[in-house]
Image: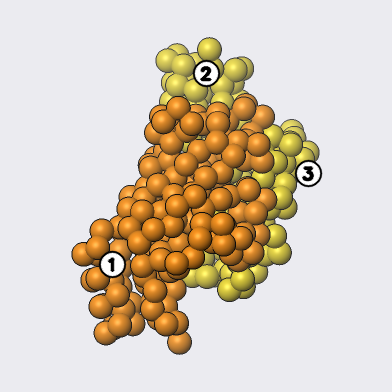
Chain colours: A orange, B yellow
């Protein structure tokens, strides 16, 4: 079991711009993954969080499963398409949360084991410190065994 | 006429994380807007550009029109929804380019003048130094006169 502190360090080392965003992995379970960015480095001069930072805190969740439940030798999750809806301006730190069910985990591992790849969809919600949903994403990912 | 150098400085001041990405505005015309990010600060440890950086270089284009053709006292372009398709890994600097036609510019200015807001769509292409398209975005924006 990798701790969320170790995963935060890992993600920031792998993707340095996420260190500049001060991104943290708060929860890294088999099914639920949560990440956070503070307002400070991610704001614009209107006092709200920049769209690209809201995108990133949600998008990065897909990769975390490679350390929790989508663990297969030589396989990595790749992002294929993301749609993000911006619902409200965010003025505080935000949390992005997503869930993958056990049936999907089993399917993706089995298909990747057999065919070398498998698609899955993650719906994530980004909310501010008051619990208001500020953005929603639908991400299409593929677990793929690299050559 | 604002120069692309002045706009680069303006955008980096307004959105500090875009300074961390070393984003540049290369072209800021009435109809065509082009931005660039280098590989260096935007990569991951697989040697490709991070998804959130490809998103940002395309998303930011919509805001540039506020300095070129969608110029209306007190009005700002807000992003409502973006879909991004990741087509290929990017391993070099990338350019994002989009175009808004004169009819749309006239419509958006007229509607915002009359009703305080108007929606428009931007299709952007993100390509690497070899000219390969690595991502495509469809962004839904709204020019809105702020209270």
Comparing A91 with A4, the one in front is: A4
- Of residue A56 and residue B11, the one placed in the foreground of this image is A56
The answer for how far apart the CA atoms under marks 1 and 2 are is 46 Å
**Residue under numbered circle 1:** A105
Where is residue B55? Give x, y as percent: 53, 52
Q: Is label 1 in contact with label 2 (beta carbons under 8 Å)?
A: no
Q: Which residue is mark 3?
A: B5
Give the SS element for disc 2. strand
> Which class describes the residues within 10 Å of circle 1: few (<14), some (14-19), or many (20+)?
some
In x, y percent, where is residue B145?
52, 18
Answer few, some or many: residues within 10 Å of disc 3's Cα (few below 14, many 20 plus, some between 14 and 19).
Answer: few
The picture quadrant where one finds residue B6 is: top right
Quarter of the figure that contains the C terminus of chain A: bottom left
Give the x, y percent position of residue B15.
66, 38
Residue at the spot x=33%, y=82% of the render?
A: A116
Tag 3 subunit:
B
């Amino acid at each position: 079991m990798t701790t969320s502190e170790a995963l935060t360090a890992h993600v920031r080392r792998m993707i340095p711009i996420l260190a500049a965003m001060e991104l943290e992995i708060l929860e890294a379970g088999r099914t639920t993954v949560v990440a956070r960015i503070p307002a400070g480095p991610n704001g614009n001069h209107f006092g709200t969080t920049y769209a690209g930072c809201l995108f990133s805190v949600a998008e990065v969740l897909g990769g975390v499963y490679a350390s929790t439940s989508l663990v297969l030798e030589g396989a990595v999750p790749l992002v294929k398409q993301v749609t993000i809806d911006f619902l409200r301006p965010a003025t505080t730190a935000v949390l992005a949360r997503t869930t993958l069910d056990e049936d999907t985990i089993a399917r993706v591992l089995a298909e990747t084991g057999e065919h070398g790849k498998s698609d899955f969809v993650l719906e994530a919600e980004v909310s501010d410190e008051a619990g208001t949903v500020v953005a929603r994403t639908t991400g299409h990912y593929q677990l793929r065994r690299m050559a």
